[in-house]
Image (cartoon, rainbow, N blue to C red):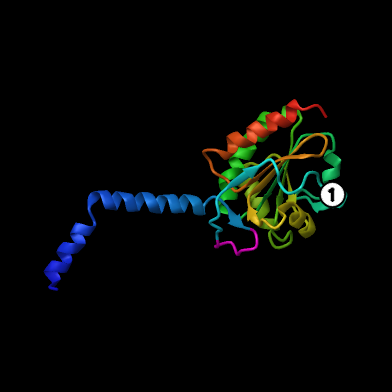
Amino acid sequence: MSEKTQESNRIKFWTPLRAVGTVISVGLLLALGLSNCNSNDPPSTANRSPVTTGVNPGLVTLPSAILEAENKAATGGQIKLANYSGKVVLLNLWATWCGPCRMETPELVKLHKEFQSRGVEMIGLSTEDPDASAQSVAEFVREYEVDYQIGWAKREVAQVLMQGRTSIPQSFIIARDGRILRRFIGFRPDTTPGQIKEALEQALSEKG
């Protein structure tokens, strides 16, 4: 086959419709790839599994060992989940290097401003090493103007919460009586904020 014939075939293959379809397909793949990261991966590696939400997070309530665990706080001291008993809590697992976590944080800040006056407590626990990531977490808090409690999840706390699903971000909506109402794995800007808001409204509507 001559070079002229090969070139003609290539031109015929890349029709406008086929080119547009390829661009759309690549865009969808990128969107899926940005939905979540794997907390066990290095910062540059993303997990391309889809975002999932559900009313059955694998845990019905948090075990006492997890409630009493002392997670290091970014401002000093400890974050103990047991101290939030009787309150509606949004617990978020994240990391500074995780792209979807960075996309989600501004939405969490907005939700905190909206629901804080109604008694909702928000806690963000990084899955990173607290010593190695101290500076990056501090910079993250400043960059995104995070005004809710930030710290690091102890390894056993993260393991129990994740139940083998290591993708981040993960958010847990915890009712006043300690039940886990919803679990969100991953983040999609078009759907996740609204779903989290709906879950918070549900938790607030229940009597403790």
Image quarter hosting the C terminus: top right
Of the pair 82 and 177, the residue shown nearer to us: 177
**Which residue range is magenta in the image?**
39-45
Dot 1 amino acid type: Pro
Residue pictured at 78% horizontal, 57% vertical: 154
Residue pictured at 61% horizontal, 36% vertical: 195
Q: Which residue is disc 1 drawn over?
A: 63
Is residue 207 inside the magenta stretch?
no
Q: Is residue 3 above or below residue 37?
A: below
Query: How many discs mark residues in the rendered view?
Result: 1
Please provide percent x and percent y for residue 87: 80, 34
Q: Is residue 117 above or below residue 185?
A: above
Q: Is disc 1 surrounded by few (<14), some (14 to 19) or many (20+) residues within 10 Å?
A: few
> Going by the image, does 32 lie left or right of 20?
right
> Going by the image, does 77 lie left or right of 198?
right
Please provide percent x and percent y for residue 53: 62, 43
